[in-house]
Image: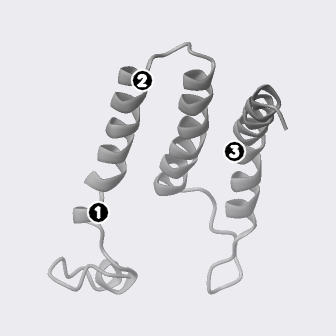
Amino acid sequence: MTPEFLEALIKAILALTIAVLPFAALGFYLARKNGQGKSMGVGARQIQWLAVGMLIPAIVLLSLEHVIDSAVTGTLIGGLAGYVLSHVGRFQNREARKSGNPDSDTTD
């Protein structure tokens, strides 16, 4: 396989990921059921992860096409990582949310 073919293959996979991922993830979350058998719907956390899942392939694709240079790519990926990891400290497990106790263990 030539390097040009591999680059074209990676670009095609990333483009398909950007196009298919939101619909697949949205369908998965809409099909989920809670304990009573009712649909759970889409919440803020799912929308955040969909956005992150769409941005990473888009950033890589733009970088491969040399639309953005390596410094911008690193900055965008670093900002995305900071965004994702900034919410870790505020995470509460399901039992803590139900009991209303913010001092409960923060692992799920």
Tell me if 51 is positioned left or right of 73 in this view.
Answer: right
Coloured how? one colour
Residue 99 location, quadrant: bottom left
Label 2, secondary structure: give it.
helix
Label 3, secondary structure: give it.
helix
Cα separation, mark 1 vs mark 2, equals 27 Å
Q: Say few, some or many: other residues with alpha carbon within 10 Å of mark 1 (under 14 / 14 to 19 / 20 or more).
A: few
Which is closer to the viewer, label 2 or label 3?
Answer: 2
Residue shown at 69% from the left, 69% from the top: 39
Three-letter residue code for mark 3: Pro
Residue shown at 63% from the left, 60% from the top: 41
Cα separation, mark 2 vs mark 3, equals 26 Å
Tell me if 39 is positioned left or right of 78 in this view.
Answer: right
Point out the residue furthest to the front here.
2
Residue under label 1, please give it: 88
Q: Nearer the viewer, residue 49 or 60?
A: 60
Three-letter residue code for mark 1: Val
35 to 39, vertically: above or below:
below
Q: Nearer the viewer, residue 18 or 67?
A: 67
Give residue 70's mark.
2
Q: How many marks?
A: 3
Q: Nearer the viewer, residue 107 or 41?
A: 107
Give residue 22's mark.
3
Three-letter residue code for mark 2: Ser
Give the quarter of the figure containing the C terminus: bottom left
Q: Earlier in the sequence, mark 3 or mark 1?
A: 3
Point out the residue furthest to the top here.
67
95 to 17, vertically: above or below:
below
Residue shown at 51% from the left, 44% from the top: 52
